[in-house]
Amino acid sequence: MKPDLYTKIVITAIAIALWGILLKPIFVSDRVNASSGVVDVNIKEIGGWPVHKIIDVNVERVNGRTFSGTAIPVQAKK
């Protein structure tokens, strides 16, 4: 039994759609926005040692770079 033209077209369309879904992240990136405003951060430990007092944190320079109204690189580890 030979597949008819309709079946070939449908299977080809499905294959093209699947390739489109697969390749979409390569060509189109989703826009991500950071939230604005104040974020409450609670530091439980530093270097494995518990924090028992209030630490004044005023970030102005990181690795010799001055930050004012721009993004600060952060690494969060769990």
Image (cartoon, rainbow, N blue to C red):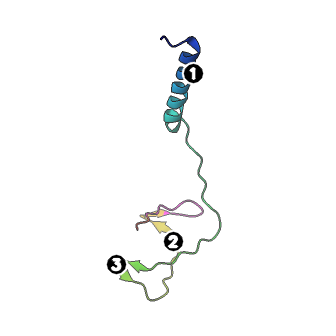
User: Viewer-nearest of labels 2 and 3?
Assistant: 3
- The front one of 25 and 4 is 4
**Quarter of the C terminus within the rendering:** bottom left
Secondary structure of the magenta portion, mostly? loop
Residue 48: which disc?
3
Give the magenta range.
Answer: 66-75
Q: Earlier in the sequence, mark 2 or mark 1?
A: 1
Q: Position of residue 4 (x, y in %)?
A: 55, 12
Q: Position of residue 77 (x, y in %)?
A: 40, 66
Q: CA distance from mark 1 to mark 3?
A: 59 Å
Q: Considering only vertical position in the picture, is 46 above or below 53?
A: above
Residue 59: which disc?
2
Question: Which residue is found at the position 60% from the left and 58% from the top?
Answer: 34
Classify mark 2: helix, strand or loop. Answer: loop
Give, as a three-letter code, the residue at label 1. Val
Point out the residue furthest to the front here: 1
**Mark 2–mark 3 CB contact (< 8 Å):** no
Give, as a three-letter code, the residue at label 2. Val
Residue 10: which disc?
1
Question: Which residue is found at the position 56% from the left and 23% from the top?
Answer: 13
Q: Earlier in the sequence, mark 2 or mark 3?
A: 3
Give, as a three-letter code, the residue at label 3. Gly
